[in-house]
């Protein structure tokens, strides 16, 4: 730990490159790839470039440029990969949604573009207005209270497709749980930054396992109860898994105690077992996971998961090509939870590999920013935000490829869903600020 | 904190790596089983994404494809469905495919590997191959003549080119329109169940897939067995045949349809001309089971592997019988059963000097050409020449007069097969024949006709009266 050196005056002679030019070049590439995908869909479906390709390209390019300018002004040392990856994933998501729009009765791409614009606006807002991320630590308890409210509110709204995670009003629906993720990450980071010593160095030791004391066990149990509560009351297994996984990761990073992992594993196993046994919605997901073709054998035709597997398999190594697949067979949620199946069928394992690598890069750069920081809150916040992305990608990708039980969750940036895309842009904005702080501090120390 | 942060990072990346492995499993390792799952609609979507290749008769397509504007883009259409249904079969989005549509499916649907000109390049582009056309051997004039000749009656016609084995006509009536069941949805399912429930079973291919007792037409096989085995050396020498003929080991006495005295001790020529049951029943017994079964087998009886390329129903000549049963079998009764195609092959072998050519329905496809091949040498040329004489005699002076064609040499044999328990069923009228122009020795056509007409007067059902004119029309169309 070298936190004491943070405030040392910068030696002016050595300057780190800001790498904004790299970011701009990568942004151009990201926009061009997205526009190419958009044109490829049109060519495959109609034999012509979609008439609004220029408009789509300029909208995405304009958003990317505005975000880039705000970064140049306010976070000049930020990681140059984060923004291009976000733009590319968002652009690719729009391409996939547009492609599915052509074969489904509803049209989702224009709304998704508007949500993306709102997301970029919030990105710019965060980058411009949040001068110092450390002020967030002051609002830790406000954050957790707000997160709880956001998670509880949907319970009073009708369930949509088995999950009570939406607020629907006047044809307008949002998923408040998405925003709660960021707020909880802020709270966890702030709480653990303050209490990590108490959590780490008290309690009994059994062989190599350092067990936490009962006093500090209280908050972790509270989080566990909330996670299970979300699961049972809202029937949202994915979010529950995400919250708990996030907390265990941050706890481990903050305290370095393997005991917490043991406790976390025991509690999550107990929670998962109880949910699987008692909650019919979760139970059916587990059954589907183990027997994805049961409905075919029963003569009811393939279910969503089977259709998803068919789509992935049809893609093979190289994919059918954009616009050439039949992933619409999945039916409901093909643009949201199952969006990756379309990527799998039309872009193949090559495309899926590229997408997963993009996420891995995003996560790695988030972690890198976190590990480079000396401020425990900033470090935990960066790691927490990066972990949210990793866990989310794992839960939904694992679900649609039958690796783990399927739980409804939005693929970050790719999937249809306004709340999700907005939240992910906020996450990227925060990571940008954190990486900016980390690297400008590096420059400050003249390394 | 840094060390544990790195652990957490490694954990997250491990999660993502697991996803890559999971995707590899689904997309590469297990993908063949997912792709081949019958519940995977992609199979049907790909199959019907392009127009199917056509089946050609006389160089013109008798099939087509209709755009549907639905998920399965093209549906099979038939220009002359009922006429060619026994040739084409059907290709249905709901019920699969039969006959040529099934046998040549890989060519018609474009999935045959040999259709791909540049396999490696195609593996990269994965462009779907257009379906190939299947050119049949059918002679449209003969097919039409047979169909028109059968009219509304239940029956079948098979016609061959004896010199090559090319199938010239394959007709079964009543027929159906395969286009009615080609699609999906209630229209197709209603048509399908209507066809299944129809008392006349229009979807049965009577020419290829239905066996009938061949009756007196089978006497041709018996005569050939007798000549080949040496049981008879002179067709004009009187045989030692009583009338009626008491079946050996039985109290039943075999009689003749027409109660003339001519059958007693009749020569083979006369017995064949006026179709004496007594003479041929005794002759079969004289020849013996082994030689009879060998000769029948040489024609294709008891051959389960006969394909044209669709499988033909196996014609039967029993190989485990007592003497009375053998005598009855030798006049085409008891367990003896033959498809119209099989009896056309009998006529063809006689016409072609004893050489039976492999019957085939496909002339060529983009990936294969059918070359003429010999099925079996059934009899030597000498026996064949004697049989040709007997058969032309049966047309010139015997029961088959109504098959005679001016300017052509026609040989034939009638048959009226008894049917059902104690012959209560309506008998089947048979006629087998061959013909060639007077100025040419090359046989042009061999044909077998069967009419099972429950609506007709029993007395009218006779090979000579009902079936011979149809055979004549078909042969005229070819000549």
Image (cartoon, rainbow, N blue to C red):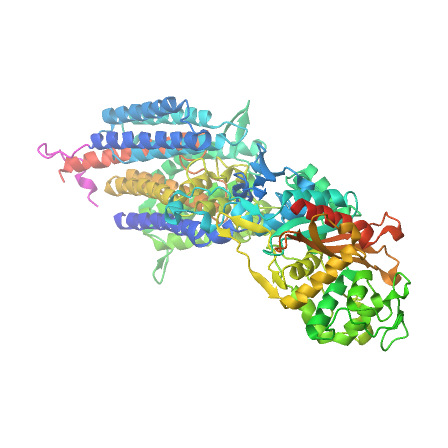
Can the viewer see residue A406 in this picture? Answer: no
Q: Nearer the viewer, residue B281 or B437?
A: B437
Q: Residue at x 60, y 56 (%)?
A: B163
Q: Nearer the viewer, residue A265 or B360?
A: B360
Question: Is A432 situated left or right of B135 in this image?
Answer: left
Range covered by the magenta-colored residues:
A1-18
The quarter of the displayed image where residue B420 is located: bottom right
Which residue lies most toward the bottom here? B249
Q: Nearer the viewer, residue A178 or B64?
A: B64
The quarter of the displayed image where residue B122 is located: top left
Say if B332 sits above or below B458 in the image. Answer: below
Residue A294, horizontal then vertical, whole percent = 59, 51
Say if A379 sits above or below A275 in the image. Answer: above
Which residue lies most toward the left here? A13
Question: Is B299 situated left or right of A63 in this image?
Answer: right
Can the viewer see residue B176 in this picture? Answer: yes
Q: Is B139 included in the stretch rendered in magenta?
A: no
Question: Is A267 situated left or right of A56 in this image?
Answer: right
Residue B479, horizontal then vertical, whole percent = 65, 47
Magenta span: helix, strand or loop, mainly?
loop
Q: Nearer the viewer, residue A37 or A407?
A: A37
Question: Is B455 situated left or right of A216 in this image?
Answer: right
Q: Is A13 included in the stretch rendered in magenta?
A: yes
Say if B309 sits above or below A426 in the image. Answer: below
Residue B456, horizontal then vertical, whole percent = 86, 48
Q: Residue at x 64, y 45 (%)?
A: B90
């Amino acid at each position: 730990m070298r936190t004491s050196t943070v405030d040392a005056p910068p030696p002016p002679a050595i300057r780190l490159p800001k790498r904004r030019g790299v970011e701009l070049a990568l942004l151009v590439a990201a926009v061009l790839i997205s526009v190419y995908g958009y044109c490829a869909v049109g060519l495959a479906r109609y034999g012509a470039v979609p008439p609004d390709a220029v408009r789509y390209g300029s909208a995405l390019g304009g958003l990317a440029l505005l975000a880039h300018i705000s970064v140049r002004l306010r976070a000049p040392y930020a990681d140059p990969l984060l923004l291009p990856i976000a733009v590319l994933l968002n652009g690719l998501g729009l391409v996939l949604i547009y492609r599915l729009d052509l074969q489904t009765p509803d049209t989702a791409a224009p709304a998704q573009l508007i949500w993306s614009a709102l997301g970029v606006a919030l990105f710019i807002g965060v980058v411009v207005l949040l001068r110092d991320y450390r002020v967030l630590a002051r609002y830790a308890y406000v954050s957790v209270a707000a997160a709880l409210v956001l998670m509880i509110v949907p319970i009073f709204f009708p369930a949509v497709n088995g999950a009570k995670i939406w607020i629907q009003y006047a044809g307008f629906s949002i998923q408040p749980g998405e925003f709660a993720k960021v707020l909880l990450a802020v709270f966890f980071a702030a709480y653990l930054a303050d209490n990590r010593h108490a959590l780490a160095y008290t309690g009994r030791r059994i062989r190599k396992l350092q067990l936490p004391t009962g006093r500090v066990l209280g908050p972790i149990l509270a989080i566990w109860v909330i996670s299970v509560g979300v699961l049972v009351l809202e029937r949202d297994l994915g979010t529950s898994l995400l919250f708990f996984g996030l907390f265990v990761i941050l706890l481990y990073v903050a305290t370095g105690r393997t005991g917490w992992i043991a406790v976390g594993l025991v509690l999550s196993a107990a929670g998962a077992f109880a949910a699987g046994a008692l909650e019919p919605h979760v139970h059916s997901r587990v059954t589907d996971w183990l027997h994805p073709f049961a409905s075919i054998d029963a003569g009811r035709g393939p279910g969503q998961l089977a259709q998803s597997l068919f789509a992935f398999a049809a893609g093979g190594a190289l994919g059918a090509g954009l616009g050439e697949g039949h992933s619409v067979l999945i039916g409901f949620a093909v643009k949201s939870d199952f969006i990756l199946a379309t990527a799998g069928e039309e872009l193949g394992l090559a495309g899926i590999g590229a997408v997963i690598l993009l996420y891995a890069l995003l996560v790695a750069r988030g972690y890198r920013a976190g590990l480079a920081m000396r401020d425990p809150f900033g470090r935990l916040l960066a790691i927490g935000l990066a972990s949210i992305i990793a866990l989310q990608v794992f839960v939904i990708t694992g679900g649609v490829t039958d690796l783990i039980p399927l739980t409804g969750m939005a693929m970050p940036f790719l999937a249809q869903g306004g709340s999700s895309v907005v939240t992910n842009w906020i996450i990227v904005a925060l990571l940008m600020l954190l990486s900016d702080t980390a690297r400008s501090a590096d420059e400050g120390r003249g390394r | 904190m840094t060390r544990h942060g790195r652990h957490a990072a490694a954990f997250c990346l491990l999660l993502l790596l697991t996803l890559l492995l999971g995707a590899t499993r689904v997309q590469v390792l297990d993908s063949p089983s997912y792709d081949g799952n019958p519940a995977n609609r992609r199979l049907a979507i790909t199959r019907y994404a392009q127009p199917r290749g056509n089946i050609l008769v006389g160089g013109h397509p008798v099939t087509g494809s209709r755009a549907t504007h639905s998920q399965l883009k093209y549906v099979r259409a038939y220009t002359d469905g009922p006429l060619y249904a026994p040739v084409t079969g059907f290709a249905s989005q709901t019920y699969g495919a039969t006959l040529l549509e099934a046998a040549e499916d890989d060519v018609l649907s474009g999935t045959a590997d040999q259709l791909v000109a540049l396999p490696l390049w195609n593996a990269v582009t994965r462009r779907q191959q257009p379906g190939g056309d299947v050119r049949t051997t059918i002679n449209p004039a003969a097919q039409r003549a047979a169909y028109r000749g059968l009219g509304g009656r239940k029956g079948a016609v098979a016609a061959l080119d004896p010199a090559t084995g090319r199938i010239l006509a394959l007709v079964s009536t009543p027929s159906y329109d395969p286009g009615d069941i080609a699609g999906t949805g209630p229209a197709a399912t209603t048509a399908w169940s209507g066809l299944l429930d129809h008392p006349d079973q229009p979807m049965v291919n009577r020419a290829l897939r239905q066996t009938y007792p061949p009756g007196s037409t089978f006497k041709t096989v018996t005569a050939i067995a007798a000549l080949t085995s040496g049981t008879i050396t002179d067709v004009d020498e009187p045989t030692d045949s009583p009338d009626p003929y008491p079946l050996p080991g039985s109290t039943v006495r075999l009689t003749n349809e027409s109660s003339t005295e001519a059958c007693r001790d009749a020569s083979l020529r006369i017995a064949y001309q006026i179709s004496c049951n007594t003479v041929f029943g005794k002759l079969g017994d004289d020849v013996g089971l082994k030689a009879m079964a060998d000769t029948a087998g040489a024609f294709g009886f008891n051959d389960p592997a006969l394909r044209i390329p669709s499988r033909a129903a196996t014609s039967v000549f029993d190989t485990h019988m007592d003497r009375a049963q053998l005598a009855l079998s030798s006049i085409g009764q008891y367990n003896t059963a033959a498809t119209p195609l099989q009896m056309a092959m009998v006529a063809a072998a006689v016409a072609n000097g004893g050489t039976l050519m492999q019957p085939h329905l496909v002339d060529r496809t983009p990936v294969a050409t059918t070359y003429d091949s010999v099925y079996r040498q059934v009899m030597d040329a000498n026996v064949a020449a004697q049989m040709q004489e007997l058969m032309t005699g049966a047309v010139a002076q015997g029961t088959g007069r109504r098959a005679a064609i001016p300017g052509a040499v026609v040989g034939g044999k009638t048959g009226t097969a008894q049917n059902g328990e104690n012959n209560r069923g309506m008998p089947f009228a048979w006629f087998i024949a061959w013909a060639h122009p007077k100025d040419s020795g090359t046989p042009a056509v061999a044909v077998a006709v069967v009419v099972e007409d429950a609506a007709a007067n029993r007395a009218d059902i006779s090979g000579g009266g009902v079936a011979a004119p149809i055979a004549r029309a078909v042969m005229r169309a070819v000549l």
